[in-house]
Amino acid sequence: MTNIKDKYPGFVTLEDSFALDTETITKYQLGHLNQYRSQIGLDGGLTFNIKKAEGCYLWDSDGNKRLDFIGCVGVYILGHNNPYIIDGVRKYLDQKPMTMDPLALKAQSAAFAHNMSLVTPELTRTVVCGGGGAEANEAVIKMCKIAAGRTKKGKKRIVSTLNSFHGKTNEAVFTGGKDIWQRWLTPPPDHSYVPYGDWHAVEEEFKKDDVIMFIAEPIQGEGGIVVPPDDYLPKIRELCDKYDVYMVLDEVQAGSCRTGYIWAHKYYEGLVPDAFTFAKAISDGVLPVSGVQAKDDLYLAAYGSFESAMNHTATYQDNNMSGAVALLSLTYMLEHDVPGMVREKAKYIWDGLADLQAKYPHILEEVRGRGFMIGLKFNKDESGVGYANAIGKELAVNHLIHTMTSINNDTILRAYPNIWTTKEDFDWFLGALEESFLAVEGK
Ligand SMILES: Cc1ncc(COP(=O)(O)O)c(C=O)c1O
């Protein structure tokens, strides 16, 4: 065996990496990963060396117990290192499985897809992507385009909403309605944007008779936790039926129980999109897992033939371990009635936030969202700067609580608790928030 440290002095093994100090990690990260992104977190006082994570708590390298109130923007709905999922992954690996092979039968992925069809019986086809939300959105866009190319000849346009976010791969970034992420890129053709929440604008686009798909988030996440009017998505469904357009919902952030419904669109009785995408919380952070859940007719229009069956494959789509993780998360969500748990637990924090809003309306303008997808909309200080960054920093540095601002909007702070969060933790957050208001007010 080669002595790797003789050959590459300074080489770090996994065992060594556990013992790296904060200064060394920072040096490696700034030197070899995304330097400026790392620096933003360090400068903002939001980046810490987290040594351990369990439930809703994080422990940093100084031994501080911190409260995670963001969970990697919606990933950890089932808590960090949920024992059921971790044990399940160990059990899976103990079988010495053949984790992936395009030609093998895939017991865990097949079981996950089968279970998904039980939960959403109108959408019985699953595309598992061993990746993130953007990959799932790319997959659904491609599915709709291929289906339309075969069945809706002449139609080609994709309508999405302004201020939306669907990921940062090339077509996903142009499906999102935030031009800041589109800078320096060349746009793919046939994308149009409408204001979120305005179905009249959607109908005006549909009337042009060239639209193949409409895509939106059930609640805009990156855009600042924007909840549409209650009649919006049901009306979009009607319009999609009337004008023969695929209705797609991006459930990457709002789905997987985050809003108190297994899928956020289940808030609307009887609403069934043609497809929805999922990622983030479906793996509870254990592995990258994402996917598309689609109606039979849409899926088959795209891939329902030997000719087109190979048009959307990817090496890690065949990764059965992602299937196992998704299967474990879904099982846990259903066995523990996580949607009901979120709805019940959320009442306490929403009541507390309503009290704070009534007491400090000049700082906290609005509390919005649903369930554990909470957006705090702040006012701006006298110099026109939103309070969100200052309050996020106060919470992290002085109260050991992790939240996150909405990128490029300094008036929005996102608070995403998870199911392990207790009343005492909510009080920790509410008390810290009030103290942070006083601190920024006094500055
Ligand atoms: C609604 C939505 N769609 C897609 C994405 C992209 O997911 P990923 O970052 O995993 O590619 C995100 C990420 O925040 C999201 O919130």
Image (tube, grey):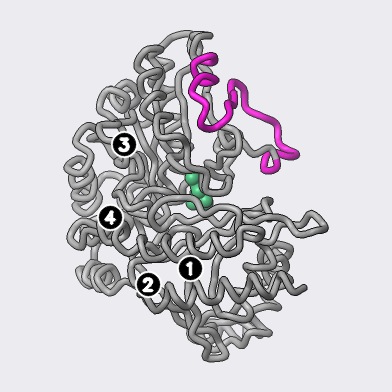
Q: Position of residue 260 (x, y in %)?
A: 32, 53
The mark nearer the N terminus, 2 or 4, is: 4
Is residue 175 rendered to the left or right of residue 304? right
**Secondary structure beneath disc 2?**
loop
Q: CA distance from mark 2 to mark 1?
A: 9 Å
Alpha-carbon span between mark 2 and mark 4: 14 Å
- Kindly report the distance in space between the C-alpha atoms of the residues bearing marks 1 and 4: 18 Å
The amino acid at mark 2 is Thr
Specify the farthest residue to the right. 383
Across and down, in percent, residue 36 comes to 73, 63
- 2 and 1 marks in contact (CB < 8 Å): yes
Q: Are circles 1 and 4 on residues that touch, CB within 8 Å?
A: no
Q: Position of residue 145 (x, y in %)?
A: 45, 23
Q: Is ligand 1 closer than 8 angstroms to the Cβ of mark 4?
A: no
Q: Which residue is mark 4?
A: 339
Type of amino acid under label 1? Phe
Q: Where is mark 2, residue-wise?
A: 421
Q: Earlier in the sequence, mark 1 or mark 4?
A: 1
Q: Quadrant of residue 294?
A: top left
Which residue is the site of mark 1? Answer: 69
Q: What is the distance, in whole Å, between disc 2 and disc 3 at their CAs?
A: 27 Å
- Front disc: 3 or 1: 3
Q: Which residue is mark 3?
A: 268
Q: Quadrant of residue 232?
A: top left
Q: Amino acid at mark 4?
A: Pro
| Residue 1 seen | no
Give the distance between the C-alpha atoms of the residues marked 4 and 3, in whole angstroms.
14 Å
- Where is 358 relative to 186, above or below? below
Instruction: Check mark 3 vs ligand 1: CB closer than 8 Å? yes or no.
Output: no
State the residue at coordinates (58%, 62%).
404
Pointer 3 local density, CA inside 10 Å: few below 14, some 14–19, many at least 20: few
